[in-house]
């Protein structure tokens, strides 16, 4: 690799990390107004859009560890937003299900959250958003493949 290639890659990483951190701070602040962490919000949002889910399925959707998902669902149960229900097919499995309070909360805050994200991303044109999505997906898949090669 040349110095120019290395410098370009490092600059891209710094810009990407700073942009991600800035957007994440805005999202965290937006969601925190409702007494939730971004991961808790991700769980109730997934349940809202997908319906009851097994804890393992939620774990893969919100990218947390198995111990982390148990802790997070416990917190949402304590807040009265989610219940655990047994699987009719597997006695060991449990579904997370939105309570009426959880459903009411996500239905009241999701549209505002979506609008916040839309305003934030509107800095880029529709074409730029599509290009960024394509490029970042390509970067993520390549990084994941490289990570798999190193294991």
Image (cartoon, rainbow, N blue to C red):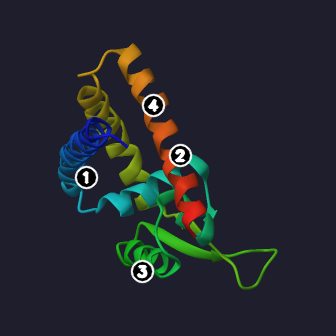
Q: Position of residue 97 (x, y in %)?
A: 56, 65
Mark 1 or mark 4, which is nearer to you? 4
Give the mark nearer the N terminus: 1 vs 4: 1
Residue 5's place in the image compared with 60, above or below, is above
Mark 4 or mark 2, which is nearer to you? 2
Q: Is label 3 in contact with label 4 (beta carbons under 8 Å)?
A: no
For mark 3, give the secondary structure: helix
Mark drawn on residue 85: none
Nearest the camera: 128 or 103?
Answer: 128
Mark 3 neighbour class, 10 Å CA radius: few under 14, some 14 to 19, many 20 or more:
few
Mark 2 or mark 1, which is nearer to you? 2
Image quarter for residue 42?
bottom left
Nearest the camera: 144 or 101?
Answer: 144
Q: Which residue does the numbered mark 3 point to in the structure image?
A: 71
Mark 2 or mark 3, which is nearer to you? 2
Mark drawn on residue 135: 4
Q: CA distance from mark 2 to mark 3?
A: 31 Å
Give the mark nearer the N terminus: 2 vs 1: 1
Give the mark nearer the N terminus: 4 vs 2: 4
Q: CA distance from mark 1 to mark 4?
A: 27 Å
Q: Position of residue 108 (x, y in %)?
A: 34, 44
Q: CA distance from mark 4 to mark 2?
A: 11 Å
Residue 137 showing in the rendered view: yes
Give the mark nearer the N terminus: 1 vs 3: 1
Which of the image's four quarters has the C terminus? bottom right
Q: CA distance from mark 2 to mark 1?
A: 31 Å
Q: Which residue does the numbered mark 2 point to in the structure image?
A: 142
Q: CA distance from mark 1 to mark 3?
A: 19 Å
Mark 1 neighbour class, 10 Å CA radius: few under 14, some 14 to 19, many 20 or more:
many
Nearest the camera: 13 or 96?
Answer: 13
Give the mark nearer the N terminus: 2 vs 3: 3
Q: Is label 1 in contact with label 3 (beta carbons under 8 Å)?
A: no
């Amino acid at each position: 690799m040349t110095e120019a290639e290395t410098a370009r890659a490092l600059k891209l990483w710094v810009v990407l990390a700073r942009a991600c951190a800035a957007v994440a701070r805005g999202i965290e602040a937006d969601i925190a107004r409702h007494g939730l962490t971004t991961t808790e919000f991700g769980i109730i949002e997934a349940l809202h859009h997908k319906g009851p889910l097994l804890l393992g399925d939620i774990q893969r959707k919100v990218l947390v560890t198995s111990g982390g998902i148990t802790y997070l669902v416990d917190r949402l149960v304590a807040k009265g937003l989610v219940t655990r229900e047994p699987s009719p097919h597997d006695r060991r499995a449990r579904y997370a299900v939105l309570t009426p309070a959880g459903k009411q909360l996500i239905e009241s805050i999701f549209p505002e959250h979506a609008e916040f994200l839309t305003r934030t991303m509107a800095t880029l044109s529709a074409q730029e958003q599509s290009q960024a999505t394509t490029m970042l997906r390509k970067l993520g898949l390549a990084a994941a493949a490289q990570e798999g090669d190193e294991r």
